Amino acid sequence: MKAFQANLPVTLDFEAGAIRHMGEKVEPFGKKVFLMVDPFLQGSDLVAQITSSFAEHDIEYLEFYDIVPNPRHTTIDRAVELVREAGCDVVVAVGGGSAIDSAKAVALVAVHGGYCWDYTERLGEVVTRPQSRGLPLLVVPTTSGTGTEATPFAVINNPELGLKCAIVNPFIYPDVALVDPQILVSKPARLTALTAVDTFCHSLEAYISIHCTPWVEMVALESIRLFATDAQRCVEHGDDVEARARMAFASTLGGMAIASAGVTVSHALGQPLGAMTDAPHGGTVAASTPYVIGWTLPVCADKFARVAEILDPSTQSLTEMERAQRLPGILEKLFTTLGVTDTFRSYGLQEHQIDDFAQTVWTSFNQDLACHPKKITSKEEVADIIRMCF
């Protein structure tokens, strides 16, 4: 068996109604909260439940709603200033990946200083990598997609440079994640579909990564199985709490998988496309994944065959290679059924931008490319893959 280590330094509180206990969970960490919330939740019952719980425990709080998809480095730096000025000693995030990634960065930078962009991983650049934790951090994910509640990553967008890069640091994990499936039932079908696809791609990429271990394989395959059984149910019947709970668990498992094994080519392409065009992350990885699989074959055929069988049990009678070759088509059909059908072109990438885009992928996401089971040797090869997805 391949040697491995597994570490998840975050307490997962997975329960319908978990948010009602937020004050109790925060109290051991501090008495003044910087509350970062997705703006569409402003004035919601969800926020009211959380702030009422704070009041019950005499916890002060400062609310912050200036969060956008693909979170900006400038917004995070401004939030850090507010944290310091107000003397907040705990950060709480309520929302999707953008809110939680922003909060992870704020908690780290508020203690260690400087600008958040200096903490992001960029090939050939000087990077600030703290060796201790930031402020205590508690998070409430309101989507089932990023799995960021269980990762040491925070993805940051720098529109001025046209780059979207990640802070990668073991000290950026949340202290506590309250995963409450009850709050997911109101999410619209389109968002549900996009985040579900992101969950699948996390698990698939971790599973095929060169850093996959027996631990990652177990976690990733269970996440893929839950996606197969519950993603469409959540899109079509969003009020099904049990299906929502299973997809929330799949998302957390996907986060755990990439925390150990990383992501590969689909994310290396999808993240900078989101930075360039503000396209939804789940859509960008969906647009590339079937083509990346086709390009990767016959490498990793055994794993692709296993995933194909989970997604489409009717393929069981086929040979391993036949199942693997079916996977791109299975995914295209499944993504279409979920309503995720966009391409790199439809998201705004233009043909004359492909070479520059490939250069960005090659220099800023080389770490992700290096995790892929089929070796990529040049920027030109990246450009060829982009053209397949176009």
Image: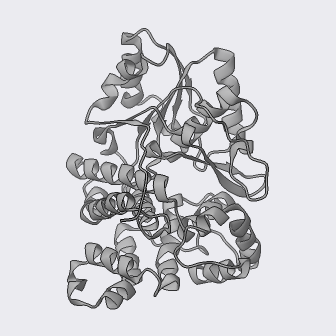
Of residues 233 and 199, which is closer to you in this image? 199
Residue drawn at (39%, 24%) of the image: 50
The N terminus - image quarter: bottom left
**Relative to residue 186, is residue 234 depicted above or below?**
below
**How many numbered marks are there?**
0
Viewer can see residue 99 = no
Residue drawn at (41%, 66%) of the image: 207
Horizontal side of 327 relative to 239 (left or right) equals right
Horizontal side of 53 relative to 238 (left or right) equals right
Which image quadrant is residue 280 in?
bottom right
Image x and y of residue 71, in percent: 62, 45
Of residues 159 and 376, which is closer to you in this image? 376
Residue drawn at (52%, 62%) of the image: 263
Image x and y of residue 115, in percent: 75, 37
The C terminus - image quarter: bottom right
Image x and y of residue 44, in percent: 41, 31
Q: Farthest residue toward the top?
A: 58
Horizontal side of 335 relative to 249 (left or right) equals right
**Relative to residue 305, is residue 284 depicted above or below?**
above
How is the structure coloured here?
A: one colour
Horizontal side of 211 relative to 133 (left or right) equals left
Which image quadrant is residue 273 in?
bottom right
Image x and y of residue 289, in percent: 49, 74
**Relative to residue 235, is residue 133 depicted above or below?**
above
Viewer can see residue 211 = yes
Residue drawn at (26%, 36%) of the image: 15
